[in-house]
Amino acid sequence: TWTTGNVVDEQVALIRAQVGTKRAICGLSGGVDSAVAAALVNKAVGEQLTCVYVDHGLMRKGETEQVEKDFVAATGVQLKVVDAAERFLNALKGVTDPEEKRKIIGREFIRVFEQAQAEIIAEAGEHGESVDFLVQGTLYPDVVESGGGTGTANIKSHHNVGGLPEDLQFQLVEPLRKLFKDEVRMVGQELGLPEEIVQRQPFPGPGLGIRIVGEVTEERLDLLREADAIVREELTAAGLDREIWQCPVVLLADVRSVGVQGDGRTYGHPIVLRPVSSEDAMTADWSRLPYDVLARISTRITNEVRDVNRVVVDVTSKPPGTIEWE
Ligand code: XMP
């Protein structure tokens, strides 16, 4: 019979058999899949695993801390955190096109990750050890979509990455290959991971970078982080987390509208709420949030977030609208 306990025991045995005494690397994104995959491998081979977390500065409030502190506390995993926020901000300077943003964030991410990887490999080498394995949180639907997968990853080195072989061959460790998302969450729970990570809703890799319509700046990120935190807090308090698929919060940084607050006229930015219900994100419907919840969110955002004087709700289904605005 299928129990999460069985899955954990079986995977731990398989990982031990596969990895042996070699070393493994795992990139953490803050999401459920990479966290559960890392926790499983950590349970199996402990100190032979090093996790890497690239902080691109585009995460939501508290998310980096959840990885750095709570995840590490729960698992005891070895974690290398790279603070690359400034690098990403510099690379995004002046960029407003969504696809351009995605490309830049993806490119910088790979560079920073490979640099960290090269350092870990070099360090292991000094102790006469080799890093042969890369852990990935591939799920069953990913396996089906990509037609089975190959079992090896070819990670090409970039010109600016020193010390990395031209064509690095890792063997993949993919302990979640047979699981669906809800099963992964159960396994995560079984492994004692923090609720905030195990129950996390989907969040795009490029993070808040594609939720600021306009140029990404530190100030705008701070502002959006505050608004997003309020939305998440209120949705959780209202018990709506399981009912909605996700709720992007978007800052229309290049739009201003007139408002009135206290005695004065304001000229601030709108925040868009994009709550959606969905099965798989391929199609989605806009969630009919209770009016009183919307009212609380609106009041709090306009009161608590500087430069925001209007809150609007996106009532477009997908199609024609995508879930994200960029
Ligand atoms: P869209 O906006 O295409 O989003 O309707 C569908 C789902 O994918 C997520 N999303 C992304 N995830 N990198 C990701 O890892 C991306 O660039 C990206 N863009 C969208 C989005 O949050 C939704 O769950």
Image: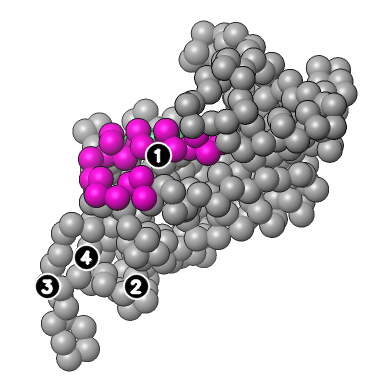
Inspect the magenta stretch and tell me whether residue 93 lies in it.
yes
Name the residue rendered at 70%, 55% in the picture.
Answer: 70
Q: Quadrant of residue 181?
A: top right
Q: Nearer the viewer, mark 1 or mark 3?
A: 1
> Can the viewer see residue 227 in this picture?
no
The mark nearer the N terminus, 4 or 2, is 4
The mark nearer the N terminus, 2 or 1, is 1
Local SS, label 2:
loop
Q: Quadrant of the N terminus?
A: top right
The x and y percentages for residue 64 are 57, 54
Q: Nearer the viewer, mark 2 or mark 1?
A: 1
CA gap, disc 3 and disc 2: 16 Å
Q: Is residue 314 above or below residue 38?
A: below
User: Left or right of 118: which side holds 155?
Assistant: left
Amino acid carrying label 4: it is His
Q: Are marks 4 and 2 in contact (CB under 8 Å)?
A: no
What residue is shown with label 2? 305
Local SS, label 4:
strand
What residue is shown with label 1? 105
Ligand 1 lies in which image quarter? top left
What residue is shown with label 3? 258
The mark nearer the N terminus, 3 or 2, is 3
Local SS, label 1:
helix
